Amino acid sequence: MSVNCRNCNADRKITAPRKALAALRRDAGIPPTRKISILGSTGSIGKNTLDVIRRSNGNYRVRSLAANTSWQDLRSQIEEFRPGKVALADEAAARNLRRELGNGVPEVISGTDALAELAADEEVDTVVIGVVGAAGLLPTIEAIRTGKKIALANKETFVMAGRLIEDAVAVHDAVIIPIDSEHNALFQLLASASLDDVVQVTLTASGGSLYNMPLDGLHSVTPAEALAHPNWKMGRKITIDSATMMNKAFEVIEAHWLFGLKPEQIEVLVHRQSIVHGIVEMKDGSMMAHMGMPDMRLPISHALTYPARNASGIPRLDLTRVGSLTFEKPDPHRFPGIALGFEAIRRGGTTGVILNAANECAVDAFLGGVIPFTAIVDTAVEVLSRHAHNSQPTLDEILEADVWAREETTRCLKKY
């Protein structure tokens, strides 16, 4: 598929967030039963989404589920939720599942186009994009093109192709609601505000698993140490991104595209308690904060039920037990990756594609014991320096840049 963005006005006012909020306010009459597709159903986002659905008193029918290789977990989900179709990216895993299920329902599809097929299904009105990395881009585009409500946890979609996504949302009758905790918090705060009155938004960060480790010890960090997140239960890749804070670089880019914010309107603060998920400062000097327990079921429930609210199943926040809330500016020496997010906004074009692909490959290499922890961000910087920038790429050119970046990262990693 190909989307051409060469005639886009790069300076135009972003209207997609306003359109999304207006459409959702207008469409307060949510269908009695939503037909939902969950892409990444065996990961952290998918499992939390299914838990929200369990508590929804039949408001959702799971039409389809998709995973990468975890066919046994998918088999258990099929037994409980009875989807009509499932997908596995891995062909061997799909063969195992078909053999286990026999010839009955559900239909099992596989391959590189399987996720996009589920996202475009006419029987589905809500798609949860819970897959990690570049794999989320094409199914998100298909869900937009077919006018779905999209609950988006895949920040890499905006990192790679923010301009294309915003243009597509503006053309098609689709709505994106973020389910990253930080962006969902901002979505809720901005729903009752004029974007023209916003001075600054703050994305909070836990600081990850290595926040208190001396800087000279980061080089020898093990994957097990980096994966020991203090507050959140997440997948391996996003947990490493939290430790490097590359996830904040990506979230800065996502906030830019979701809400039409300039780089100077976005701030990142370390908030170790993970209770405040987002802050909005208005031009009259007032500040609004969104607080809640660090549990992904909260933003997922909000995204699925908006503009209504249902019980999410999470514990109530007791501020007397929390005791105190602290905020610090991130140390640029400890977290050099954050600056790459702001650079990607300013440079635009294929910068985000290269950053995402290099980071994905470097994280895999660290988890595999190939490179030290500190080489993750260093590798991304090196690959960015070798890239021939394209300021207005088409979708095909974005995908080509992604392939180039992965090949170039592989070459860079050979020195370790």
Image: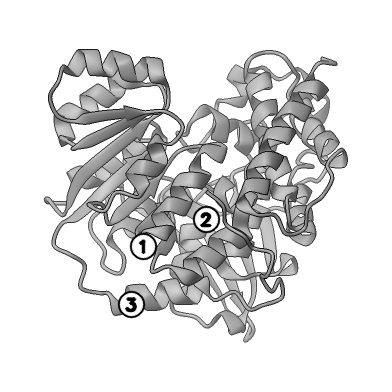
Relative vertical location of residue 39 with respect to residue 390 in this rendering, above or below: above
Q: Quadrant of residue 379?
A: top right
Instruction: State the separation of the CA atoms marked 3 and 1.
Output: 16 Å
Instruction: State the separation of the CA atoms marked 2 and 3.
Output: 21 Å
Q: Nearer the viewer, mark 3 or mark 1?
A: 1
Residue 413 placement (x, y as % from top left): 79, 20
Q: Which residue is drawn at the image coordinates 79% and 58% (left, top)?
A: 347
Identified by mark 2, the residue type is Glu
Quadrant where the C terminus is found in the figure: top right
Residue bearing mark 2: 182
Relative vertical location of residue 16 with respect to residue 113 in this rendering, above or below: below
Marking on residue 147: 1
Relative vertical location of residue 368 with respect to residue 82 in this rendering, above or below: above
Q: Which residue is drawn at the image coordinates 18% and 30% (left, top)?
A: 106
Residue bearing mark 3: 25
Res. 345 visible in picture: yes
In terms of depth relative to the viewer, which is nearer, 281 or 81?
A: 81
